Image (tube, rainbow, N blue to C red):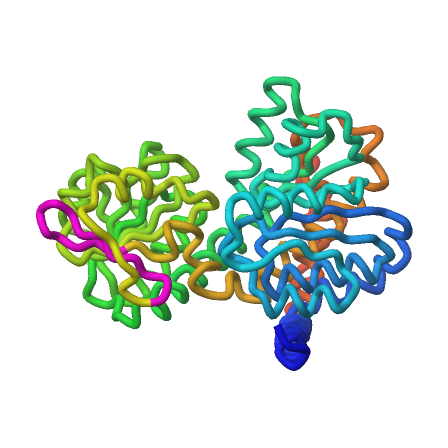
Amino acid sequence: MSRIYDEKLKNSGLLKIEWVSKRMPVLTNLSEYLKGRFDGVKISMSIHLEAKTAYLAKVLKLSGAEVAICSSNPLTAQDDVTAGLASLGVNVFARRGESETEHEENIESTLAIGPDLVLDDGADLVVTMVRKHPNMKVLCATEETTSGLTRMRALAREGKLPCPVIAVNDAQSKYLFDNRYGTGQSSWDGIMRTTNLTVCGKTVVIAGYGWVGRGLAMRAKGLGARVVATEVNPIRAMEAYFDGCEVMEMKDAARIGDIFVTATGDINIIDRRHFDLLKDGAILCNAGHFDVEVSMAQLRNYAVSHREARNNIQEYILPSGKKIYVLGEGRLVNLVCADGHPAEIMDLSFSLQSLSLLYGLENGKSLAKEVVPVPQKVDIDVARLKLESVGVKIDQLTEEQVRYLASWE
């Protein structure tokens, strides 16, 4: 790679980081508060490596930390952003399209600094510590995703969690906005820019009606789609029904859907049971963290052939002659096929991350080795700061109102 190309790549990444920094006012303001608070602290990060995450890494470095970072998915790193971030002095171990072996090596390199704190997105760093580095001493970790917390809680149940884990994903200022509005918008951004097709008039099937599914359904309706939801939880299914979605089993939805988006965090949501039921030309994609919701292994084994029909679109021909299309190899469609969540949304999530890391640094020794919530004060402070940044003022309780709410009379 020539020096000229390197410079272009680096400068492109730096411009992307600068662009999002201007639209993440809470994290920008917190960077002044955090200066010097992480002096001498080593932080290992595994997260989708694009401009917003790069800005978070930059803020942590400017706060005094030594930062090492890898991508939490082989296809979600943006090479210009990694080049720009590396030029800022962050230890970067990632490239787009890395092999599984490279991905594992990059995780190892990220942990090689001997972190005091870990920021995880999917639990890969913590799981690697458990499997390969049982003696590694980490003060505290934070976790960004629902899927990651599922793994963390499984480790905790087995008594294998190596350190306290702060559940950033469970903070209200995270899941009510990031999961719903962030994934809801960015997934459709990825689908539309990759396919260059309309959503209006199509039948969209959303698998899973958690906060991500709610956001996906909301945006699909706004784009003019007929929305079908599939669920295993009766309460969430009822919510989808009351929200105006058609609710049915996947075996029935498979016959009528034009676009399928999985958002469950579980395996084999669309698999061999459903392939022959799909319409010719059906489009499948995934908004969950791991590439297991659409069973890609089963699809590859069952299909007669496959090819790249368009960038980030694989065409699979079934024995019946039907063609179905998978976006982004079944990986996170909003990051593989687009740029991830909007900067304004990630301002909330990454402000929570930075303050949770600080909380872990200051309190990690006294916390049990289990999954713990983000302190409520941190959650509320981030929301308050976000409102201030957009010029919104809200009412405050009077002393009389506080007394009334505290009284039983």
Hey, which residue is sitting farthest front in the picture?
2
Q: Position of residue 342 (x, y in %)?
A: 54, 66
Q: Compared to 234, does 23 lie above or below?
A: below
Q: Compared to 227, does 120 lie above or below?
A: above
Which residue is pictured at 17% across the width and 58% down the height? Answer: 281
Q: Quadrant of residue 323?
A: bottom left
Q: Position of residue 355 (x, y in %)?
A: 76, 50
Hey, which residue is sitting farthest top in the picture?
158
Query: Range of the magenta residues?
Result: 311-325
Which residue is pictured at 78% across the width and 34% down the height? Answer: 138
**Which residue occupies the foreground of this view, 216 or 160?**
160
Q: Is residue 319 magenta?
A: yes
Tell me the quadrant of the picture where the C terminus can be found.
top right
Q: Position of residue 289 (x, y in %)?
A: 48, 45
Mark yes or no: residue 51 visible.
yes
Q: Compared to 380, does 250 lie above or below?
A: above
Q: Position of residue 41 (x, y in %)?
A: 86, 47
**Which residue occupies the foreground of this view, 129 or 183?**
129
Q: Is residue 349 magenta?
A: no
Number of marks: 0
Hey, which residue is sitting farthest left in the picture?
320
**Which residue occupies the foreground of this view, 20 or 66?**
66
Tell me the quadrant of the picture where the N terminus can be found.
bottom right
Task: Give the left or right position of residue 327, taking residue 49 as reference.
Answer: left
Mark yes or no: residue 404 visible.
no
